[in-house]
Amino acid sequence: MAKMTLEELRSLRNRKQSDIERREVAGKDCQVIVGMGTCGIAAGAKVVLDAFLTELQAKGIKDVAVTQTGCMGLCYVEPTVEVIVPGMPDTIYGKVDAAVAAKIVQDHLVDHRLVTDHIFDRPSVDIMKNGGR
Amino acid sequence: MAIRNYILVCGGTACESSHSDQIYNALVKEAKEQGVENEVQVVRTGCFGFCEQGPIVKILPEDSFYVKVKPEDAHELIAEHIIKGREVTRLLYDKTKSTKHAQVEDIKFYQKQFRIVLRNCGFIDPENIDEYIARDGYAALEKAVFEMTPEDIINELKTAGLRGRGGAGFPTWMKWNFTKQVDNPVKYVVCNADEGDPGAYMDRSTLEGDPHSVLEAMTICGKAIGAHQGFIYIRAEYPLAIHRLEVAMKQSRDYGLLGKDILGSGFDFDIEIRLGAGAFVCGEETALLQSIEGHRGMPMPRPPFPAVKGLWGMPTVINNVETWANVPVIIHKGGEWFSKIGTADSHGTKVFALTGKICNSGLVEVPMGTTLREIVFDIGGGIAHGKKFKAVQTGGPSGGVITEANLDTPIDFGSLVRIGSMMGSGGMIVMDEDDCIVDVAKFYLNFTVDESCGKCAPCRIGGRTLYHILEKITNGNGTMEDLDKLQEIGDAMRKASLCALGQTSPNPVLSTMKYFKDEYLAHIVEKRCPSGKCKKLISFTIDPEKCKGCSLCARNCPVGAISGELRKTYHIDQSRCIKCGVCHDNCKFGAIKVN
């Protein structure tokens, strides 16, 4: 790389900053947790995970941590995604695809409105300690 | 597909020596084999500081903190964590708490820490300048070169109240100002990376984990004082730190952040590395400058101070690695911000290398004013193996011991001197009840006697005499007059030695005499070593009540000093016993007594 001017250094910093911010966990209150058990992956969870990352980046949303987890036990509606936003109920969405993911980002994370068609209950919450958490 | 996981692998020397480089390679290989190489990024970072539990691997964004990882664990980490999203519980630090939520915050080791110097260590890839830039790297240089006058830069440091982290705590802005005021076309900037205290590795870790912060700071200093050349004096036994510095220097030269016409501003500054051969005295600034010039590393009388007449007779600013690492943050965030951290006379944070008989040895950075108790018991996790705390040695061979009674002292430059020790560069060695305090003093003295350059008599002769007296005491031949002699010679060395090495080398002796007089008296009057360390003063005997006559001791004795008949009491022949303690360690019935 050739020597930089001040402007070039600043623009490089801006570009790289968003890359590295994704490593920060602190300060990210919202979480999107994608179920990536075998069932989830078979049903397309990887596409969903990618859709979330692309969508969040496209919209410039930075305070959301996208993580993954194992099977949530809702294998009949995979891929499943849990979305945690402060001040909103923790929600599990099922039968998510790339389009639904985009909708979740816009409605749930931006407008704070639940995507009602895709909400599923955590299985056996009533009979497990701490509601299964 | 976008990157969704970051795997941070510790690349500090401590973790590298337990094969973190192989872990890194294995992770990269596994990610490729399992088809996720486009979804995860494996990053080699600097020291996480939690060396006790190394090698450390951290996976983001889950923030899973894996400890004591082995190269063969790579397959499982990729297959389980990355592909299936299940944490590998057996490798987690806190195995009871496998959650998807922040793990590092739960570790007590990190809770009381505040990281300025180590801000990027364990987070960025030290060999990638882009990651440093992304974390506001070189933003301070921008500001210094384009927006600030030299006076502004020095005033910012003055507001911050930054004091030298090498040990003495001299205000950094004053040093810079002295050099700035001298009218001379050639001036130099020097980084003292000759870290020599036994058990200290703060500077090494900083250079390994965040080399650009030092380069940036030195360039800022060059601008402030009107220098165009810098030198980093680092010991040759830090190969990884040297390598990372070289990579960093090349990258910043390529980017135009170092060298001619920095960022098109017309300001020139470049840095060279000078390797030291590892003599302790070369950490002393005048000796260090001699060594850079190619002479034998021996201290010179001051004044003149290097700030006025330093390298090749030119005005020279010389600061320690940790001091440098603070500078970019101060310039970027402002002196005001920095001055709010810490205590009234010591601002900011201090990095300590916590070692010795402690549960979590490692690198810690705490705000000034944190108490020793918090460092030893909260961050350090207390004494290993449930033993009793005895003392902590700060300041290495130049410092002194701090006992239980002073553990609640808030740490800053002044308070440590008041209780008979010193901040030093940041080595902190914890001792438990098994350590003999006279033996510890002898150990440090042995080190300084060995490292004395021999130029001035008080250090050369005084140190050796002190050592001989201590040897006499630990051999059981000490007299009460010896205690007075130790005090007298120690005082003379403090006053008359040429440099800090000689002035401070009696400190371990004098401070242990002050706080553990009873232990010295036990050696001298009772001819007894309370912790059983001084071999000449102990003897092993067999308790007939407890001995079952199993012959285990006799079979393990390397000199055949133990004899007896099976199922009858055994005996130790004192004239042949070499006091190695093997019988004591092997006896299953606790029948071997140490007297």
Image: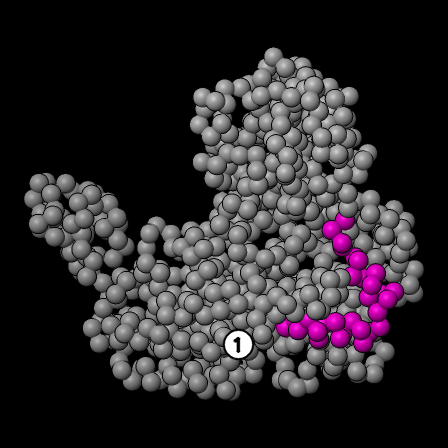
Secondary structure of residue under mark 1: helix
| Left or right of B170 in this view: A17 | right
The residue to which callout 1 is attached is B414
**Residue at x 22% of width, y 71% of height:** B527
In this view, B23 is above or below B347: above
Question: Which sits in the foreground, B155 or B50?
Answer: B155
| In the depicted structure, whether residue B73 falls above or below residue B206 | above
Is B521 placed above or below A125 here?
A: below
The answer to whether residue B329 shows anywhere in this view is yes
x and y percentages locating residue B561 in the rendered image? 18, 52
With respect to residue B78, does B523 lie above or below? below
Residue B73 percent coordinates (x, y): 54, 30
Q: Nearer the viewer, residue B105 or B301?
A: B105
- Chain letter, disc 1 residue: B
Q: Residues within 10 Å of mark 1 (few under 14, many from 20)?
A: some
Left or right, B331 with respect to B435, comes to right
Observer-nearest of B88 and A71 = A71
Predominant secondary structure, magenta span? helix
Q: Is residue B165 left or right of residue B567?
A: right
Q: Is residue B153 magenta?
A: yes
Figure coloring = one colour
Q: Which residues are magenta?
A: B134-163
Q: Position of residue B271 (x, y in %)?
A: 78, 63
On the image, which quarter does residue B548 sit in? Answer: top left
